[in-house]
Image (cartoon, grey):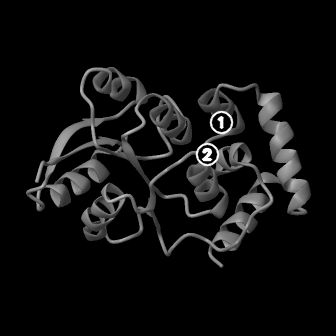
């Protein structure tokens, strides 16, 4: 059996090290490369095809769902497993619509990863049991803004990260506050965190 060539796109070295250590336990897996940015990954796979990409959503240079779409458009045989902190249904549905082969949460036992890789290589798909059953009335773009706020970024920093104006960020936050009947962003974050724990 030929080894499965796996690449990791994740900007936290501790997470990457955990993934690599579990991959090394399987003789049929080979690490093609580990990358911190989407730009580095695309430069590599232009000349080095891979079988599986383990992909985070929060990246320094691009949104992981956009990376997923480009992979599926330009490198179709590649299987993509989203490996994320985000357990909200809106993220999972967006990833599956964009043809993700698997969606695994970082809170899942890392020892499960080889099993998920083998499943998607056989043409199956995987979605973590930990995904929230709550359907929030926000778009993936709004969820991206909200999750950056949850991580402690200011509105200006959020605008810089997603490369939109502060006015755009404020418009979407206002829509979310209205839907959740919140007076301010702190209240919005608090309600959101309670919802996703249901």
Where's residue 151, x and y in %?
A: 57, 50
- Which SS class for mark 2? helix
Considering depth in this image, is 146 or 43 the residue closer to the camera? Answer: 43
Query: Which residue lies under the disc numbered 1?
Result: 158
At label 1, counting other C-alpha atoms closer than 10 Å, the crowd grade (few under 14, some 14-19, many 20 or more) is many
Q: Is residue 58 above or below residue 92?
A: above
Residue shown at the point (53%, 48%) measured from the top left: 99
Q: Residues within 10 Å of mark 2 (few under 14, many from 20)?
A: some
Look at the picture and state if 4 lies above or below 118: above
Quadrant of residue 101 in the image? bottom left
Q: x, y percentage for residue 25?
A: 11, 62
Q: Which mark is residue 69?
A: none
Residue that appears at 50% across and 31% down: 73
Q: Specify the quadrant of the image occupied by residue 117.
A: bottom left
Give percent across and percent down for residue 157. 63, 33
Left or right of 167? Residue 28 is left
Does residue 33 sit above or below 44 in this rendering? below
Kindly identify the residue that appears in the image at 77 percent across and 29 percent down. 166
């Amino acid at each position: 059996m030929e080894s499965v060539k796996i690449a990791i796109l994740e900007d936290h070295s501790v997470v990457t090290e955990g993934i690599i250590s579990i991959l090394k336990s399987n003789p049929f897996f080979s690490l093609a490369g580990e990358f911190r940015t989407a730009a580095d990954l695309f430069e590599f796979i232009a000349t080095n095809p891979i079988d599986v990409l383990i992909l985070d959503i929060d990246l320094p240079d691009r949104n992981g769902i956009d990376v997923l779409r480009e992979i599926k458009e330009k490198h179709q045989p590649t299987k993509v497993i989203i490996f994320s902190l985000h357990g909200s249904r809106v993220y999972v549905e967006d990833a599956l619509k964009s043809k993700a082969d698997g969606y695994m949460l970082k809170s899942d036992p890392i020892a499960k990863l080889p099993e998920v890789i083998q499943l998607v290589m056989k043409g199956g798909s995987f979605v973590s049991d930990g995904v929230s059953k709550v359907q929030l009335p926000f778009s993936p773009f709004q969820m991206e803004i909200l999750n950056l706020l949850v991580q402690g970024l200011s509105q200006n920093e959020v605008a810089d990260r997603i490369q939109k104006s502060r006015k755009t960020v404020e418009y979407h936050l206002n829509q979310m506050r209205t839907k959740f009947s919140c007076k301010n962003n702190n209240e919005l974050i608090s309600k959101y965190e309670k919802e996703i724990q249901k």
